[in-house]
Image (spheres, helix red, strand yellow):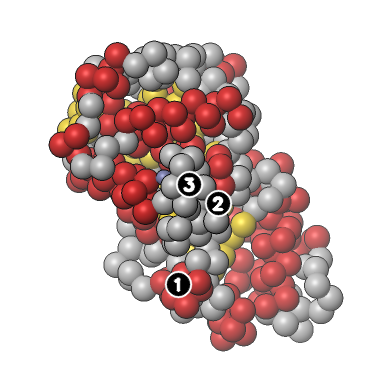
Amino acid sequence: MNKCRLCNTKDAEKKGSHIVPHFLLKRIENIEGKTGRDYELGFTIEKLNAKSHFGRSVQPEKLEETFGEISDKDIEKNEHPLIVDNFFCIDCENRLAVIESEYAKTTETKDTREYESGICSAIGILFWASVIWRMSINGKSGVKLTQEENEKLRQILDCFLPQKLEELDEKGINENGLVKPISYKLLRCCECHVDDAKWLFFHPDFFNPLCLLIDEYVLCFSFTDNFEDIDNKDCLGINELIEQAPINKVDASEKIKPFDNATYKLMTSNLLEIAKEDYMGGLDEFFDRAHVAAGGQENKMPPEIKAEIIAELTSNKKKMGRRYTQEDVNNSIMKIMKKHAP
Ligand SMILES: [Zn+2]
């Protein structure tokens, strides 16, 4: 059996490990209020390899059969792209869970002005490092750290993730040479609507810092306290907000910069523009699957239909309030596909 990716010593016997913590994954993938797996609507967009999936109940009958593949049964079989087997040992999985459940509590605190989330940045660094690191070693979400960066995060996590929260060595973290240069900014849409589409998107053009859009959060994470890319490249149209956001480093409370729903919609719109321009190739596989599932001829959806779906998604004709909801994303795809149905 493989060795655990975190401790490198024990057997990686844990099945069903979440790459993205469950409390975030369920917010990205489920339509709020409907907790059943049937309502999953997840998108993971990454350059050249987009993975997307639908749940069953929100689909017309024909799609039901195929997209039922992400069902409870499959979750049990762990065929979800963000759930993996034999990555970690039982102990390390538990250590990851300890920091997650502590961090999950911060989602309850919200404010319209800059606020403290209620935990120390040491926990914030461990949590967000664990998310980025897992996405990177899983290699399916567009996160590609260098081997050296992966190893740096692994060492930090292996050294400081406690088995019990009471055992957290905050002083050790604050004084550690690998952790000290790390800093991050965290922004959060504090008025996301329950039916706003949520995304998991790692921006491929950003290194200093790494930029991750996850659920209603934007994380900018730097190994070296370097945020210069924010000055030079467009980050979903919210550079100015990121500039204003406080920098979190060890030995302080985590601070979050909130933003409003209109900004969230703008970000989504910019994200879909990227999808439109750069990610068509990446979305191909998904569109083709939808096409086949709907009983389309050949194994590929015609390119003009793909373009039309993207155009529908990014169309400006719709009322702002209704754009980019889970339902809207779903309906856009269905609408175009139905239009072209024989
Ligand atoms: Zn382990």
- SS class of the residue under badge 2? loop
Reply above or below: 156 against 322. Answer: above
Residues tagged 3 and 2 counted as in contact (Cβ below 8 A):
yes
Q: Residue at x 45, y 58 (%)?
A: 13
Left or right: 189 in relation to 235:
left
CA neighbours of label 2 inside 10 A, class few (<14), some (14 to 19), many (20+): some
Reply above or below: 10 against 331. Answer: above
Residue placed furthest toward the right: 298
User: Which quarter of the image is occupied by the N terminus?
Assistant: bottom right
Residue 74 is situated, as x and y percent measured from the top left of the image, at 51, 73
- Report the Cα–Cα distance between label 1 and label 2: 21 Å
Q: Give residue 4's mark.
A: 3
Q: Does any portion of residue 316 appear in the rendered image?
A: no
- The residue labelled by disc 2 is 2
Query: Looking at the image, is mark 1 or mark 3 nearer the viewer?
Result: 3
- The residue labelled by disc 1 is 76
- Report the Cα–Cα distance between label 3 and label 2: 6 Å
Q: Given the image, on which type of amino acid does mark 3 rest?
A: Cys
CA neighbours of label 3 inside 10 A, class few (<14), some (14 to 19), many (20+): many
- SS class of the residue under badge 1? helix
Quadrant of the picture in which ligand 1 is shown: top left
